Image: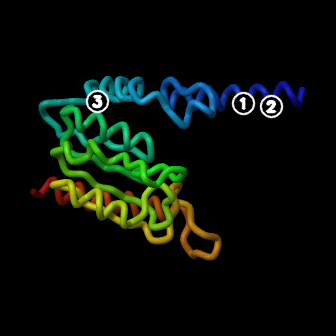
Amino acid sequence: EDSVARHSAKQRHRERQSIRRPGCQHSRERRTGRPKLLEETWNNVTARFQSDDEKLVTGGRSMGGRISSQVAAQNTLVHALALFAYPLNPPYNRALSRDGHLPDIAVPILFCSGTRDNFASPGDFVAAVAKMTNATVHELDGADHSFGMLKSSSRSRDDVWKEAVDVMLGWLEGLAKA
């Protein structure tokens, strides 16, 4: 019975992963994520929520933010992007930059990233934002790629997320006033 329960739990985890990232059935596939399928899915979601009456802000965390930004660079109608833990450089190949499409995005972009993020250092963001016309970077002091903190810190992952959400809400208010 115990092995059946473990198998069932693993199956439920795989099903949740495929909902989060279409086309990713196994953990090995999560790394690549099949960008074309993800972009197609993101375009479908964006089209569903577009409205003549309201502005649409999209974004995501890590690969979700990357795909959102790639879709926005293809002139999908969005009014702003909020990107959390954006993966500028894979940790296994720091020379490989994933920022080539970012200058093509005409809408305002907010990046919230941890100062200990192994996918993008604060210096990486300085270089990327220098190529863009309307980007804001907020550093989450001490946070890693998952917004986790060192045990010695008095802050928790929830504290970091609260900071990131508060920054995003303030940023959105500023956009609304502009």
Q: Amino acid at mark 3?
A: Thr
Q: Amino acid at mark 1?
A: Lys
Q: Characterize the local packing of mark 2: few (<14), some (14-19) or many (20 or more) Cα atoms within 10 angstroms.
A: few
Q: Quadrant of residue 12?
A: top right
Residue at (31, 57) in percent of width and height: 168
The residue lying at 21 percent from left, 30 percent from top is 50
Q: Residue at x 59, y 25 (%)?
A: 25
Q: What kind of element bears circle 3? A: helix
Q: Is residue 14 placed above or below 166 in the rendered structure?
A: above
Looking at the rendered structure, the secondary structure element under dot 2 is helix
Real-space CA distance between mark 1 and mark 2, rounded to the nearest whole angstrom: 6 Å
Labels 1 & 2 near each other (Cβ < 8 A): yes
Mark 1: which secondary structure?
helix
The residues tagged by marks 2 and 3 sit, at their Cα atoms, a distance apart of 36 Å
- Tell me which label, 2 or 3, sits earlier in the chain: 2
Q: Position of residue 103 (x, y in %)?
A: 21, 47
User: Where does the image place residue 145, in percent across and percent down from the top left?
Assistant: 50, 56
Instruction: Give the percent coordinates (x, y) of residue 172.
Output: 23, 54
Checking the image for residue 6, the label placed there is 2
- Residue 46, label in figure: 3
Residue, x 88% and y 31% (percent of image)? 2
Q: Which residue is mark 1?
A: 10
Q: How is the image coloured?
A: rainbow
- Specify which label sits upstream in the sequence, 1 or 3: 1
Q: CA distance from mark 1 to mark 3?
A: 31 Å
